[in-house]
Amino acid sequence: MYIRTITFENYRNLQSAAFFPAEGINVIYGDNAQGKTNLLESIWLFTGGRSFRGAKDSELIAFQQPYAHLHLTFYANEREQNIDMTLRPHQRTALLNDVPQNNMVQLVGHFCAVVFSPHHLALVRSGPEERRHFIDAALCQIQPAYAVRLNRYKRVLHERNALLKDVPYHRELEDMLDIWNERLAEEGSYIALERQRYTRLLSESAVQFYDGISGGKELLQLTYKTVFQGTEDLDREEIKQQLLTAFIQRQKDDIACGYTTTGIHRDDLMVKINGKETRSYGSQGQQRSAVLAMKLAEAFLLGEAKREKPVILLDDVLSELDTNRQQYLLTKLEGFQVLITCCEKEISAAYSVRMQDGQIIIAE
Ligand code: ATP
Ligand code: MG
């Protein structure tokens, strides 16, 4: 899969223009605050996700403008495709191959990309929510049906929490929790099973990448940490029963707290290097390398599942890596279309452009 062109209008500081990346490695270099990350961020939106910097859509529209408009043409699934997107302060609309989409979830899985920016260090530095989001977002690109299930789980959880808040005032409502326990366990078991399978594959691949990045000196371990106990070979029905038991056992506590204190919405992905938790004990370089290994593994798994390599967006990644690690990364990314931002034009690339004041200047 690769991008043919992207055009922007009123997107942050990017000047209205079109960008035509090459099929291999593309370097976008320039001074700070020129619009390099803005360019990658705009491309990421076509995956159906939100800004990877956590920005609201209203912040993506150029100052003083009513809307931003983006258009992507890309080659995927053996044909030319396009996505047209308009961002307004409270509404995003999109057309996929000229067909209007009801919501952005419908875009997921058509244009696929993997992004790594300094923001993603939160994957090892922050709490479990970031890591759950990482697994969920990766699974959504592989199987759009997962996104539907996840939304359903969130809805059921919301309903159960609302009921938990009402029970202390209306005791007769407590019996109704049985239905919500059952539904939450049903939806949760599907999510848990998929997350567990994905983590196993991710781990196999990320461990190898980390080994390569660290020159074989350190061992990365990724494990899915969840409320249910037992072997990794539990089937969906067994997971459902364990979740159901956990909801029933914690029901009194849940009523007292007014929310669901256990379940797959509290799962985590443990990231360890040489047996020690990376979040607490990893050096800056180890944390960065761990995230990089996870992102490479994500890209390879997505490529295998889709039988097509996703586009790779690397924001400010190279400057932090020594020459050997840079070389390892670039070798692994052969065959992918890659867009890399950096301050200096440090590496040889199929295509290089300089970003200056939101303008893309073709390098000589
Ligand atoms: P660095 O090398 O520091 O990461 P960068 O080239 O990646 O820099 P960006 O983050 O892409 O820089 O762009 C930052 C610029 O975009 C800032 O100058 C900022 O003022 C401008 N900017 C951000 N949002 C908007 C907006 N909504 N409208 C206009 N300009 C904006
Ligand atoms: Mg930047």
Image (cartoon, rainbow, N blue to C red):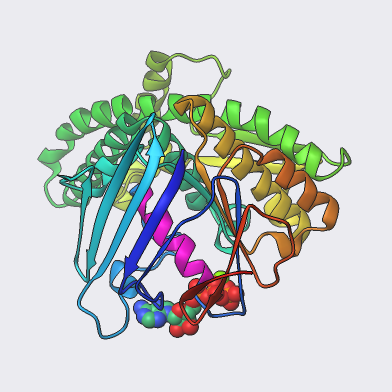
Occupied quadrant, residue 101: top left
Q: Is residue 144 magenta?
A: no
Magenta part of the chain: 36-47
Q: Is residue 194 above or below residue 75?
A: above
Give the quadrant of ligand 2: bottom right
Position of the C terminus, as image quadrant, is bottom right
Left or right: 235 with respect to 247?
right
Q: Is residue 212 above or below residue 104?
A: above
Q: Position of residue 57 (x, y in %)?
A: 30, 67
Left or right: 280 with respect to 313?
right
Left or right: 329 with respect to 125?
right
Q: Residue furthest bottom?
A: 64
Q: Would you say residue 263 is visible in this rendering?
A: no
Q: Residue furthest front?
A: 364
Q: Position of residue 94 (x, y in %)?
A: 22, 52
Q: Would you say residue 337 is visible in this rendering?
A: yes
Q: Please tell me how many numbered marks the rendered image carries.
A: 0
Q: Residue at x 43, y 29 (%)?
A: 192
Q: Is residue 45 magenta?
A: yes
Q: Residue at x 71, y 46 (%)?
A: 330
Q: Is residue 241 above or below residue 345?
A: above
Occupied quadrant, residue 224: top right
Q: Nearer the viewer, residue 115 or 238?
A: 115
Q: Nearer the viewer, residue 38 or 78?
A: 78
Q: Position of residue 87 (x, y in %)?
A: 24, 65
Q: Nearer the viewer, residue 279 or 139?
A: 139
